[in-house]
Image (cartoon, helix red, strand yellow):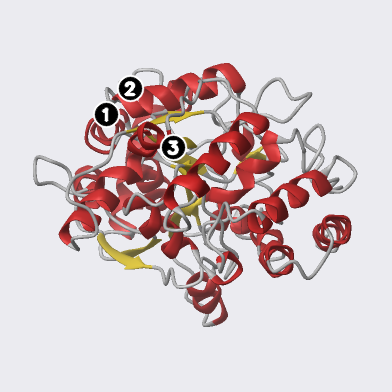
Amino acid sequence: MKKLLIVLLLVFAVFGISSQTLTVLHSGDYKYSDGTTFFGRVETLLRKDFPNVKVSWMKIDLTDGSTLTMDAMLAAGEAPNVYLDTTVRTSKYMVPEYALDLTNLIRDKDKYIPGDLDPYYINGKLLGVPVAGSGQGMCINLDMMKDIGFTVKDDWSIDDFLVMAEKVKKFYNGKKWATGMFAANQSGDYLINNWYASFGVKWYENGNYSKPLVAKNGGTKVYEFYQKLVKNGYVPPNSAMLNDDDYCADWAAGKYAATAFFPSWTKDYLNTAISQKLIDKPFEFKFVPFPRATGVTKVGAYFSGSVAVAHKTGTNIDMVSARLAEYLNNVEIENLQALDLNITPDKIASIPPKDEKSAQISAIIAKNGIHDFGLTDRRFTERRALQFPILQLVLSLKITPEEASKKFEDALNSVK
């Protein structure tokens, strides 16, 4: 009798939401080699459970890397049922006042690699689910290394990097650079932040995101290094005014010897550079850890993934939102992500990427771990907007490293 009652309740719940539309705000779809799409597959799975529910997929405005689309929708009282986006934006909404607790609604929690879900539990509630992402490494342009006669070891130092940088400067005479740097806005800050790990600088200690310690933990050393890059001509002279799009375009055009990148990005950027006749063919490259400063033994990687956050409405549509969040990261789809997009899965049964470059990133993470920047903390989205104005001053040589480091720590601490 109890089982029958549960079945009837489910039938009534499905009937109650059969004619509703589920809205999903997202940062982009994927197309697989078999012609299907990420969202198309998810919607097919969802309709097996809820045949008459419609899904409205809405793409966010990525102009400045902020949460402007989500904030505008909330201000208009039109919160999406599911928000799928990078952790650096979704963490702002992983709060109990907004997010649906998925603890008892996601059916495959035991299928995740142990520990992968831990950062998404806030005060015991599962307020988001990760959607497979990728770690980044230092991408070495091997064609440039051949030109300058330099070999980058898998374990290299800041001193090694500076030797390489000087060789690049002399060989290319300002037409190519040792690395990239930018500070026009907050977008793409993860491509720069990994340098903190190079100098062993922790933004936080022991997961205490309420007390940023960037200056106390040596942030001055990072800004000193940035200014050395500028003064010595190791980065583009107008770096303070460049943005992440400029950075990625220069990477694809083969203008950087060693700089942060994600393996899952490489194919599309290189193909674009070829179509725009910036290069004739892809350059050879490999991934290694960021170089380490004296006294630093391991340089943790920056890991960037997406998170699905379901909005808590208190209605039957919440069941559909939870199910869609679950399907966004099921094993079948993770396997496609790994094979077609070289994205690292987080389910036990999923297959790892076979791509050589992704394997290099996996080896970096296995050896050095992941540097904690507090991405899943609700304050991260607001805090990340505070660095680039300071970084502009640093790269323009208008502020000392000591002043900048203290200013950044104070700014982080101002967000409570």
Of residues 378 and 303, the one drawn nearer to the viewer in this rendering: 303
Residue that label 2 marks: 350
Residue that label 1 marks: 335
Q: CA distance from mark 2 to mark 1?
A: 6 Å
Mark 3 and mark 2 in contact (Cβ < 8 Å)? no
Quarter of the image with the N terminus is top left
Q: Residue at x 44, y 66 (%)?
A: 80
Q: Which mark is residue 139?
A: 3
The answer to whether any part of residue 306 appears in the image is no
Tell me residue 168's x, y (percent): 48, 44
**How busy is the neighbourhood of tag 2: few (under 14 within 10 Å), some, or many (20 plus)?**
many
- Going from the N terminus, do you reach mark 2 or mark 1 first? 1
At numbered mark 2, what does the secondary structure look like: helix, strand or loop? loop
Q: Quadrant of residue 81?
A: bottom left
Quarter of the image with the C terminus is bottom right
Amino acid type assigned to the residue bearing label 3 in the image: Cys
- Going from the N terminus, do you reach mark 3 or mark 1 first? 3
Q: Depth-wise, is mark 2 or mark 3 nearer the camera?
A: 3
At numbered mark 3, what does the secondary structure look like: helix, strand or loop? strand
Amino acid type assigned to the residue bearing label 2 in the image: Ser
Mark 1 and mark 3 in contact (Cβ < 8 Å)? no
Q: CA distance from mark 2 to mark 3?
A: 26 Å
- Going from the N terminus, do you reach mark 2 or mark 3 first? 3
On the rendered structure, is 30 left or right of 91?
left
Q: Residue at x 52, y 79 (%)?
A: 72
On the rendered structure, is 250 left or right of 95?
left
